Image (cartoon, rainbow, N blue to C red):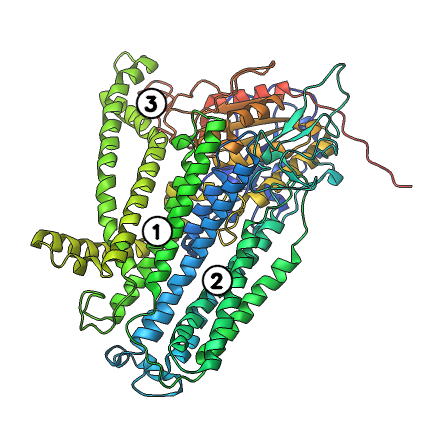
Amino acid sequence: MSPATPAPQGEGPALELLVHGVGGATPQDMLKDPRTVRITGDDKAAVHRRADDAEAEQHPEEYLDRPVPEAYCWSNLTSGNGARALWLLLLPFMVANLAHWMRPKAKGSRRTTRLYGALVRLVALSLTILLTAAACEVALDLLAWQCAGSAACSGERAWLGFLSAERGGWWSQPGRRLALAAVVPAALVVLLWYLSNRTWSAYESQRPPTAADGCVAGVDSGHGDSVGSRDGDDFHGDEDSDDGDESDEVSHHEEGGGAQAPGPRRPFVRPALGRPGFWYGRRLVARLRAAHTAAGFLTVAAAVAGAAARHDRSADDTLLKACGVLLETALALAGAAVLWVVLRRGRSERRVDARLDRTAVRYLPGAALALLALALLYAAWSRPSWESAATLPGDVTFRVIALAQGALVVALAVVALRLHRRARHPRAVLHGFGGPAVAMLACALGGVMTGGVAQRVADWLDGPGTPGMDEHGAIPGPPVLLSWQAAVIPVLLIVLLLPTLALAVRTWVLGRRLGPVVEAEYREDQPDPVRTRRIAGTRARARLTDDAPLLVGLLAGATLLLGIGAVVGAWVSGEVPGRAFGDSDGLTESTAEAAQALGSWLVGFGFLLFVTMGRRAYRDASARRTIGILWDVGTFWPRAAHPFAPPCYAERAVPDLTWRMCTWTERTGGRLVISGHSQGSVLAAAAVWQLPEATRRRVALLTYGSPLERLYGRWFPAYFGPEALRELNSQMDCWRNLWRTTDPIGGPVLVPAADGHPDVDRDALKDPLVHGRSGRYPLPEPILGHSDYQADPSFAKERAHLLDRLTPVVPAQARVEP
């Protein structure tokens, strides 16, 4: 990268550590050189330099007027081959995990904070149960119970012949069919466990630096036990120790911080993102993974054993009846153990906690798997008089799940309101209701994805008939509730249509109003009206990001109300919407039938479109940039609520950056500016938070196109709120943020000047650089928006100014062992 203005000369070496953002970038693009070499790292994340700069530290005289550029490339942590698009199937889990980190900033509300975290983890657990129940619905109910028990359905499918009740084979008994079909949902649970364990090993198992490594400050034992600690030991890391007020670690002196000035020194408040164990959640993820795996196995076991036990309660076999009671009791006790593990307090963030709760991790999934084996054996016991008719009682299961999720979301909203009232953040989205709204969307996504699969399989098995509408169909069809949930989707789209149109009109009007502002800013003698409209329209569309919370809130509220209506309609009528309104007037009946058919089609089509777009996003760079910010925000956070969510790349990237900054400054004693674009600025800030004071004072932060306040500060106020950003600025010698009004993602960080530190935000950069054509710019300059900040002449000036403010120090002497 050739700066437009050369950096001024300074003493000691200087390093610029570049961190790319959404969509990724190659080392060649970041360093503006086709010849690059890898300095350290692997094929997932690595630090690169130009080939000519590989040995820059050996020739400091060649870099007196410019910093040595390095590029940290982490794009392979979130993108790669098309198979990773399957991670999009875990989207409901990821969204539920996001709700955990959206907790409002609280002060002095330890119990309420714990309750918030417990409710989110229960919502996450319900999603695992919902996914497993949907797999049971397809494999056990639709295939093994309904289709194999129907001569019309099984007769058209030769591959189901050995299960057919008409043929009377060994597998024809309903219990044996259910036991065999249970392999499918059990295999799904095993797959989820395997993916979670494998991605943890590949992405999140990097141990962060510790005080023993000299890269992070130790916590003074007299002040490290913050509010929220348990018996002076573990923080409730995923609930109450991640708050910037009530549970920050307070230390009056950090290791390596230098001598203290006379008089009382202002204590350093270490925020949640700066705690040593924040980016190492091995203990918590392992425990939650064991609990969710056990919950999946228990769901399958309950579906199989419950059907057999219901038959035995009406039969005369006392032994089988007693076995059923004992098995159901054991399943209930195991379920209580799962709840206890999920509700248990989290992990330590005061230190890198590598311990494991071996009892839960080892024995809970094994015990659940043993109960599943007993359930299969119990169901496979010979019952010649047992016949499959109608459907398995899946309606009750899905109603209970839907009601539980609705109750949890409402309770979460009450808790979030209480937290927000104690420490109001005026720019927090939805006045503190961001977490509950996102949790509601996670439940809705889970319902749509699982219900869509069940609807499509039922349509396929029923042939030309419509499940639930035709009494003479091959099978009765899926639970009635799934049809009601599909029928409300067209209504939901109509509800969202009006605010969407209103936003579109408002954006158009705003673009027209911004035209004179654009012309006044560029002061053109003869402005081009077409060019002006393009610039103004780009600025107006960039502001739509700030309106996203409104749509999210409307979507969540409408989903909750329509979901309640679907549950009530299914419960009261006991029939699909088309038949429930069969006695109404012709318009009502036709509308209900149309909504049911259209909703069922939209669910299936949306599921296929979702997977297709996911694969395209991982292969097409432009599509990757379109949805990349949402995916990268979701996978930035550790898996503190749902262990089956996609892996957290930050648990690899943040330790990488921290190690690099610590080792380079310790070895050379030089100056370092970490330069982060977009999501890279969030990683850079998180890594700077992890540094000890001695290192932090030698590091400058340059952010551009940064969503630190615009997205993270508003959606995650407990971690990136105004107090946290002000504290970060006060603990650094220099931080500068560049932004544009045409950028739909980045924006100002809104940290004012204080304590001798200037404003972090620079005035908005011009985009484009010039309005029309000129002698210097004979061709129209592009409107860059979120990209290519380094092309602006102000970038090199700001970087040079940051380096000038840093003072190089003498590198530490190497210790000589006797």
**Foreground label between 2 and 1:** 2
For this view, does 412 lie left or right of residue 226? left
Please name whichever residue, 697 or 666, is drawn nearer the observer in this view of the structure: 697
Find disc 3 in the rendering and name its residue.
778
The disc placed on residue 545 is none
Q: Secondary structure at mark 1?
A: helix
Point out the tag, 2 or 1, that comes first from the N-terminus: 2
x and y, in percent, of residue 235 in the image: 64, 40
Q: Is residue 747 left or right of residue 806?
A: left
Give coordinates of residue 685: x percent, y percent. 56, 32
Q: Is residue 343 left or right of residue 485?
A: right
**Residue carrying label 2:** 296
Spatial CA span between label 2 and label 3: 65 Å
Assess disc 2: are there few (<14), some (14-19) or many (≥20) residues with their C-alpha within 10 Å of its C-alpha. many
What amino acid does circle 1 point to? Met
Q: CA distance from mark 2 to mark 1?
A: 28 Å
Q: Is residue 805 visible?
A: yes
Dot 3: element: loop
Q: Residue 613 — which label?
A: 1
Residue 227 x %, y %: 63, 33
Pointer 3 or 1: first along the chain: 1
Residue kind at label 3, given as amino acid type: Pro
How many numbered discs sit on the rendered protein? 3
Q: Residue furthest right?
A: 818
User: Looking at the picture, which amino acid does disc 2 mark?
Assistant: Gly
